[in-house]
Image (cartoon, rainbow, N blue to C red):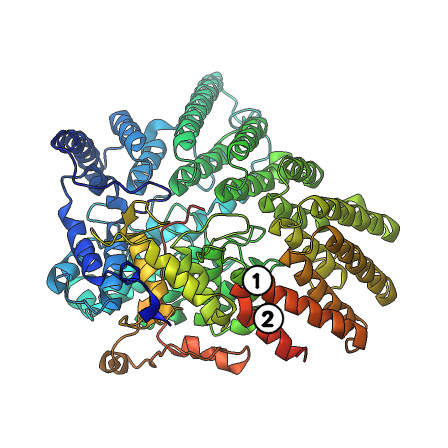
Amino acid sequence: MASHGVARTTGPRTEERRKQDLQKIDKYRALEDGIREEVSNKTYSPKTFQLTTKLLELNPEYYTIWNARRRCLTSGLLSRPSASSSRSRGLSSGSPTNTSSTSYADALSSSSAATTPLDPAPRTTGRSGTTADEAAEDKKYSNEKENLEKDVGFLKEELVWTARLLKGFPKCYWIWNYRLWLLGEATKRFPVPTSRRIWENELALVSQMLTKDNRNFHAWGYRRFVVGALEREELGGKSMAESEFEYTTKMIHWSLSNFSAWHNRSKLIPRLLGERGADDKKRQKFLDAELDLVREALNVGPEDQSLWYYHQFLILNLINDVKQATIVPNITVEQKSEYVQREIDDIKDFLEDYDDIKWIYEALLEYTLALAKLESREATTSEKEDLKTWLTKLRELDPMRKGRWDDVEKEYGLN
Amino acid sequence: MMTEQLPDEMELATAAHVKYIQSLDTKKDEYDYWLTEHLRLNGLYWGLTGLHLMGHEDALPRPETVDFVLSCQHENGGFGAAPGHDAHMLYTVSAVQILVMVDALDELETRGPGKAKVGQFISSLQNPSTGIFAGDEWGEEDTRFLYGALNALSLLGMTSLVNIDKAVEYVVACGNFDGGYGVRPGAESHAGQILTCVTSLAIAGRLDLVDIDKLGRWLSERQLPCGGLNGRPEKREDVCYSWWVLASIEIIGRTHWIDKEKLVHFILECQDTESGGLSDRPNNMVDVWHTCFGIAGLSLLNYPGLAPVDPVYFRYALPVPTMTQMGLDIFAVSETPVKPGPRVEYVFLRCINSPVSSEWKE
């Protein structure tokens, strides 16, 4: 119903095509009817599960069928953890009224108490005295172990199957959602090392997806979620800010226009510096390196918006216009002015090679105004002359945003 | 708007589009009709909105529309995409929007489990600790659902059922340095998500939290030389962003920062003037989603002959009597730019309502 990038076809369908369609519809609807019948009887059996596989391979957007599949898993295909097991916490009830407690994040944190039982369930040794009791305990234990292995195998198969589906439908929300739900189930049910390995494989998968489409925002969002999970203590994790920062460097070097990577970098930096315990000197050095990186990139591709946005992020961060933790919290206003002035000078140098790139003039305009504001003064006469020249260039190079240039002119008295 | 300068093929082919929307439910011999059943209620909403904006609100029969909507409702108050589909926020919001549009909200009481149940379904999906909303019992959280919830609850007059302050806090946490908003805290700015966040803040009466100049700049940079808008930097244009970007920039009063005529031209280029409907880009396959958002964009751009549309609720502006009946203020498209400050309040004095897309792919 929402077609993107599909060429328009003209003329009516051929009779042959119509017949093909009717055949497909029959097959599809028969499958759908089959599932609906099972679901209306609340039969979440292996047979129902198989039917959902078939239907979802034809149409992975059918969210109700994903829900039926989840119910198959929680209604018997996965073992029902015993009441004593720490793994039983937080199972989806399937009741709509309980919604708010079953978010993915909650699913993960609700397992926090279940730290690393390598055994499927802790054995209550020493409590029971009789041999018969011990035999029963042993049997229960071995059953649980067997169930656990079965469950792990089952969930892994589910992950392999949905990964295959994702390759055909990389932007289907419901597949990504279902995977996250599977991961939540794994975290609730399995010992930490097992869950962790599953989450680690997920990171590998998402990297692979991002190699195919480096701007897929589902994949980037999913990546942040997976990393967030892997960092959690209950999964035996620690901060991955360094390795994720390196990942953005890699993605940026691969394609400078990848704003998704630059964005992620901007989010990682405050944490990264905090975790490094960077002192003021190190922080300044870091800022210098980032400015060098983006300036060099701009020198090659000054028409690239992504680079200018990142440059803007650094400058805004510097002059303390961002609410998040800043890169260099302790530098003086004089130092800030020096930084901004140096950037303005360097950007002016770009004009020697490129005099028809609007971004250059926009940056000069913005940073010059920011500098005056930073120094709590009006723009100087010579600055005003520059501003007027740049504004004239902007009107010439970017007439589509004329209304904006009018507003700037009025606001700063540049007429 | 210099429409008289547009060549013939550059006019809105209203008759063709009306016919196209009317034909949508007659395509049961096409495989795609069945593959898209999970969007049926949204599709009805998109189609009806397009028809209302084009002044053909009677082109789909009202009784069947109401019957179909009610046939999608579950006992818990929520609605699915079609009969037999599970209840979800996306369809519940569409259901409420449709019933309001055809003035049939009362039928929830007389023929369904009641308005209160609908409100309860929606409010039960708020995460009390973070303020965000889930789509359904399985827990996917997204600012699309937060916006949908506030939109529908406000149409139902039931916003007191949820914690608005917490919801606002969550939206603010989704903000980025570029003035935009992402799907979750930490996520990249995206025009679709910006609309859900800005409209949510508008409904909550907290547009003062938006960095209007920064966001206005970012949004205005979405316009490409072809006149069309993209959803993120360095991406391609797409007609549906004529809604996400345009409605957002309209709400913050910066529509004059883009070239409206070029955008009108681009949207009109995406029409199939013979068979009706609009597509994402010129000469691509049409669908009801792009048809609706293209027409809504044209309405925001004051294209002649179209009814005005409310950028916050994504609904056509109701005729005066109905609005008065509902006790809501009337919306008139403002030609003059809205400056930040007290005047931006105009958007949420009106009845509040929204698009709730089911997805964006760019």
> In percent of the image, x 73 and y 64: which residue is there?
A367
User: Residue A165 versus residue B311: which sits nearer the camera?
Assistant: B311
Name the front one of labels 2 and 1.
1
In the picture of the structure, the residue carrying the numbered disc 2 is A405
Residue under pointer 1: A398
Q: Quadrant of residue B62?
A: bottom left
Image coordinates of residue B300 in percent, x first then y, are: 37, 69
Is B345 placed above or below B300 here? below
Q: Position of residue A160 (x, y in %)?
A: 44, 25
Quadrant of res B118:
bottom left
The answer to whether residue B121 is seen in the rendering is no
Q: Amino acid at mark 1?
A: Asp
The answer to which of B31 and A87 lies nearer the viewer is: B31
Q: Is residue A264 visible?
A: yes
Q: Amino acid at mark 2?
A: Trp
* Residue at disc 1, secondary structure: loop
Report x, y in % for residue A308. Answer: 66, 53
